[in-house]
Amino acid sequence: IMGNGRALAQLSISNTGTKLLGLLVIGAILKAIVTVLTIRAGAAGGTLTPSIAIGSAFGALASPLFGIEPQQGALLGAVSLLAASQQAPLMALFMIIDVTHLGSDAYLPMGLGVCLAAACSRLIIKSK
């Protein structure tokens, strides 16, 4: 939980079954709480890697609902939350593609996820 979130993201992306879903729920919730408390306290830290970690955990959790593999859900969740939290959809898309070295067959689902996340994020921000 402490740190930048790399361990939670790696666990989410490398998860191949449903055995670790409970751990991912706890990890994502605790990481979100720790990140918010750290930033509110004025301590050094950012939201880039925690967004990837939290998004990948929730994406892996939601993957059975959409009938996709947990790894695919984790990547979609990571890129979507990163795009929404940073308000930089293209940066999120290209960063995840570059880091994971995915093939061109992943571009369309990830692009759609980024578009939906950016649109929802902008609607929420405008409604405040």
Image (cartoon, helix red, strand yellow):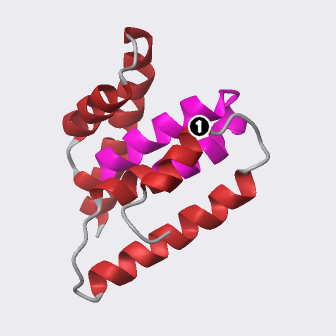
Is 11 or 55 nearer to us in this picture? 11
In the figure, residue 3 lies in which quadrant?
bottom left
In the figure, residue 89 lies in which quadrant?
top left
Residue at 27% of width from left, 61% of height from top?
A: 125
Residue 77 left/right relative to 117: right
Residue at 55% of width from left, 62% of height from top?
A: 28
Q: Mark 1 is on which residue type?
A: Ser
**Circle 1 residue:** 14
Residue at 43% of width from left, 18% of height from top?
A: 106
Is 4 or 29 nearer to us in this picture? 4
Percent x, y of residue 82: 33, 48
Can residue 81 be found in the magenta stretch? yes
Percent x, y of residue 91: 20, 37
Under circle 1, the secondary element is: helix
Q: Residue furthest right?
A: 19
Asked if 106 appears above or below 30 in the picture, the reply is above
Q: Residue furthest bottom?
A: 41
Asked if 69 appears above or below 86 in the picture, the reply is above
Instruction: Identify the magenta region.
Output: 55-84
Can residue 82 be found in the magenta stretch? yes
Quadrant, the C terminus? bottom left
Please rate how many residues cluster around mark 1, counting C-alpha atoms within 10 Å: few if below 14, some from 14 to 19, many from 20. few
Residue at 65% of width from left, 60% of height from top?
A: 25
Q: Main secondary structure of the magenta part?
A: helix
In the figure, residue 103 lies in which quadrant?
top left
Percent x, y of residue 94: 24, 29
Percent x, y of residue 26: 64, 66
Residue 79 left/right relative to 125: right
Q: Residue furthest top?
A: 104
Q: How many marks?
A: 1
Residue 27 left/right relative to 97: right
